[in-house]
């Protein structure tokens, strides 16, 4: 069995994944707050942890992996939308969950094993809060219940900051009922206009952080293998999850490995509505970007690094996938290439795995290419069909393959003679035909690019 190594944010080092229960893997990933369409930044952790889910299922078996991703369906943003539109909260959350499923399905994301809604676990949250009070880690004040941050000595370990530093450097809610500025809300009161539930502390609703702790405990147990999410959740959400879960646990532990994906930019800039570069996943799909192309762009950058969505990357991804789909048409998948599997097992190195896929494509090993790509959620039957429309048909792609082999031979001769004039002439002619020319040690690859002209390609082939 291949050894999987993952970077643990909490220990700040790569660690071998050793299941807490032999042969079983349990993973929790923070899901969306369902009040609007998911933007393309929200989609990055979906693709990252879907890829990890696929890897875990491949290594341990489909039935051995339990993946939980929640829906937060009680939140002030949802309440505000309900007040603004006059629509029932349940109608808004049901509609938004449907949108989310449609959009993530379009990116090739498998449905998790469980997708709990926070409102279905209010009882578990109340029980956990009561337990924290009994253990001296939380207190009730003016209809609120707050977690006593100073009662947990390891608070701040995940984000690498002390409590005093956090107070000095962060905006914290100042309230007269708080014993300490960093104490956070576990339960808060609701009036008649807001959703609420009966509790020992009055009519109210849960704070955000307690939701994930309660749902994770109910579905995965007090301690499980992997907890994931975006780096923006590291503090305060994940820090608070650790504190309340460890203090409510009989083992004093929570997730074994913590993983965080970095943020997403658009054309080199932070995504924001004010800059006009804010896009939902549905926006990109409606603009004609196939979901498989979006997924490929995401996988081209390691999850731990900031990712830049650009139109150029999408064009390159589309050209590559179009060629790979033509090459693997009517092919029976073979075995996953060991290099692809090893890259994914090495802290989910998707960029390295894609480089291996390019080598397989250049080597015309279609069965291995197909099996290896499908491990990453690419070239699947579910995401296919879009490639039948576009700039190059199968015959033209075959012509490009012939030209790639000709260019490779010319380059090989030129390496000996030191005369690259024929190489440069053919390369420039290909570029003029709208062909992207990729030359590396692995070989020569030709892809239809912007302004692709099939007639010029056929003229070059002769």
Image (spheres, helix red, strand yellow):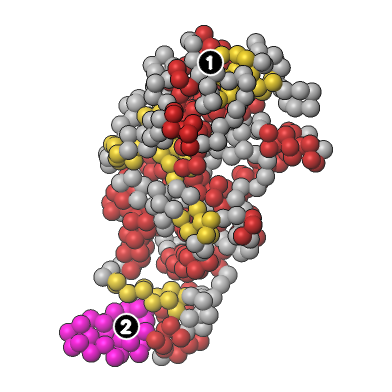
Name the residue located 37 percent from the left edge and 82 percent from the top edge.
Answer: 403
Magenta span contains residue 32? no
Res. 84 visible in picture: yes
Up/down of 107 relative to 198, above or below: below
Q: Which residue is mark 2?
A: 406
Q: Say the numbered circle drawn on residue 138.
A: 1
**How far, Cα to Cα, is label 1 from label 2?**
72 Å
Q: 248 left or right of 418? A: right
- Residue 135 lies, in percent from the top left, at 48, 10
At which x and y percent is residue 254? 42, 24
Q: Tell me how many marks there are.
A: 2
Quadrant in which the C terminus is drawn: bottom left
Q: Crowdedness of circle 2 by 10 Å Cα count: few (<14), some, many (20+)?
A: some
Quadrant of res 90: top right
Residue 423 in the magenta stretch? The answer is yes
Tell me the quarter of the image containing the N terminus.
top left
Closest to the observer: 197 or 100? 197
Does the rendering let one see residue 50? no
Q: Secondary structure at mark 2?
A: helix
**Residue 336 percent location from the top left of the image:** 33, 51
| Stretch in magenta | 401-427
Residue 285 circle label: none
- The image shows residue 384 at horizontal and vertical percentages of 53, 59
Considering only order in the chain, which callout, 2 or 1, is on the residue closer to the N terminus? Answer: 1
Q: Nearer the viewer, mark 1 or mark 2?
A: 1
Q: Secondary structure at mark 1?
A: strand
Front-most of residues 410 and 176 = 176
């Amino acid at each position: 069995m291949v050894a999987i190594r993952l970077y643990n944010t909490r220990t700040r080092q790569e660690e071998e994944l050793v299941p807490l229960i032999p042969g079983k893997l349990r993973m929790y990933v923070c899901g969306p707050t369902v009040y609007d369409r998911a933007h393309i930044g929200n989609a990055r952790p979906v693709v990252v942890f879907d890829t990890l889910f696929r890897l875990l299922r491949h290594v341990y078996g489909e039935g051995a992996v339990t993946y939980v991703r929640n829906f937060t369906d009680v939140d002030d943003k949802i309440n505000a939308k309900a007040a603004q539109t006059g629509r029932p909260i349940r109608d808004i959350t049901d509609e938004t969950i449907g949108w989310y499923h449609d959009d993530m399905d379009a990116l090739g994301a498998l449905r998790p094993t469980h997708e709990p809604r926070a409102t279905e676990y209010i009882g578990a949250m109340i029980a956990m809060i009561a337990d924290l009070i009994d253990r001296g880690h939380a207190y009730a004040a003016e209809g609120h219940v707050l977690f006593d941050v100073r009662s947990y000595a390891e608070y701040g370990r995940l984000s690498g900051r002390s409590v005093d530093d956090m107070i000095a450097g962060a905006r914290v809610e100042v309230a007269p009922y708080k014993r300490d500025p960093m104490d956070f809300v576990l339960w808060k009161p609701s009036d008649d206009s807001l959703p609420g539930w009966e509790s020992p502390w009055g009519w109210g609703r849960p704070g955000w952080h307690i939701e994930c702790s309660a749902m994770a405990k109910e579905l995965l147990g007090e301690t499980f293998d992997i907890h994931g999410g975006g780096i923006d959740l590291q503090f305060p959400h994940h820090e608070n999850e650790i504190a309340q879960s460890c203090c409510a646990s009989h083992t004093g532990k929570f997730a074994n490995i913590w993983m965080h994906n970095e943020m997403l930019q658009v054309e080199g800039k932070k995504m924001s509505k004010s800059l006009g570069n804010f896009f939902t996943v549905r926006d990109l799909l409606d603009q004609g970007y196939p979901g498989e192309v979006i997924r490929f762009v995401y996988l081209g950058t390691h999850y731990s690094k900031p990712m830049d969505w650009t139109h150029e990357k999408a064009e390159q991804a589309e050209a590559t996938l179009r060629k790979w789909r033509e090459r693997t048409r009517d092919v029976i998948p073979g075995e996953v290439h060991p290099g692809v599997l090893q890259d994914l097992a090495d802290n989910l190195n998707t960029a390295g795995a894609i480089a291996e896929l390019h080598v397989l494509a250049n080597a015309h090993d279609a069965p291995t290419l197909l099996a290896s790509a499908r491990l990453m959620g690419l070239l699947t039957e579910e995401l296919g069909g879009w490639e039948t429309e576009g700039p190059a048909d199968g015959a033209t792609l075959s012509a490009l393959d012939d030209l790639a082999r000709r260019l490779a031979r010319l380059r090989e001769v030129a390496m000996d003679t030191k005369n690259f004039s024929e190489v440069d002439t053919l390369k420039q002619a290909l570029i003029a035909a709208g062909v992207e020319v990729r030359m590396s040690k692995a070989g020569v690859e030709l892809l239809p690019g912007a302004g692709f002209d099939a007639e010029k390609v056929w003229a070059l082939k002769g």
